[in-house]
Image: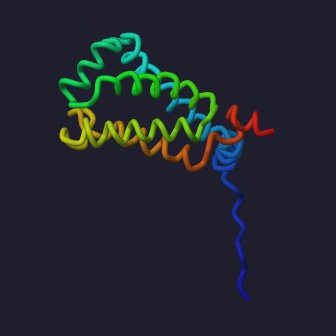
Amino acid sequence: MSVTTVTPANPIAAAAKSVTDALSPFADPLVRVAAGLLLVPHGAQKLFGWFGGYGLEATGQFFATKLGLPASLALLAGVIEFFGGLLLAVGLATRPVAALVFGLMAVAVLQVHLPAGFFWTDGGYEYPLLWAIVALSYVIRGGGRYAVDALIAR
């Protein structure tokens, strides 16, 4: 006959579990909001010249001369980052906006950053690849229950 010994639960682990259980529903919206809001300043740089950016005309010239991309893509990139970032943050039209962000970041990885290697500190593709994967996750899952999309669906 075997005897089973029951050890008392670790109170720190129990407290941590209750906190993580309570906060768990907010983890996904936290990433969505942060991803959206972190895109906004990049769009503002391109569109308005804010935050040390060059504005639309100069960004378009940079796209054309340095990147070999059509200058009109500067407007598209700025709109996706600025307005798409805001929409992603609030969770409105989450899947289509995230698809646009994913496409933009895929172009950034392949056309701009790939030749510089992996590390972002050297101009590499690490950072836009991360944002592409984050965006792709919202294309797949949607904005979640704390998104404006969910309020509209109700």
- Name the residue at 18% across, 41% down: 115
Asked whether, in this view, residue 38 is left or right of residue 18, the answer is left
Q: Position of residue 108 (x, y in %)?
A: 32, 36
Pick the front one: 25 or 32: 32
Coloring scheme used: rainbow
- Quadrant where the image shows the N terminus: bottom right
Pick the front one: 79 or 39: 79
- Quadrant where the image shows the C terminus: top right
The correct choice, above or below, for 44 with respect to 154 in the image is above
Q: Specify the quadrant of the image occupied by residue 153.
A: top right
Pick the front one: 149 or 41: 149
Q: Position of residue 52 (x, y in %)?
A: 33, 11
Q: Position of residue 26 (x, y in %)?
A: 65, 38
- Name the residue at 70% across, 71% down: 5
- Name the residue at 40% across, 41% down: 130
Asked whether, in this view, residue 15 is left or right of residue 114, the answer is right
Q: Position of residue 30 (x, y in %)?
A: 59, 34
- Name the residue at 64% across, 31% down: 92
The correct choice, above or below, for 139 with respect to 68 in the image is below
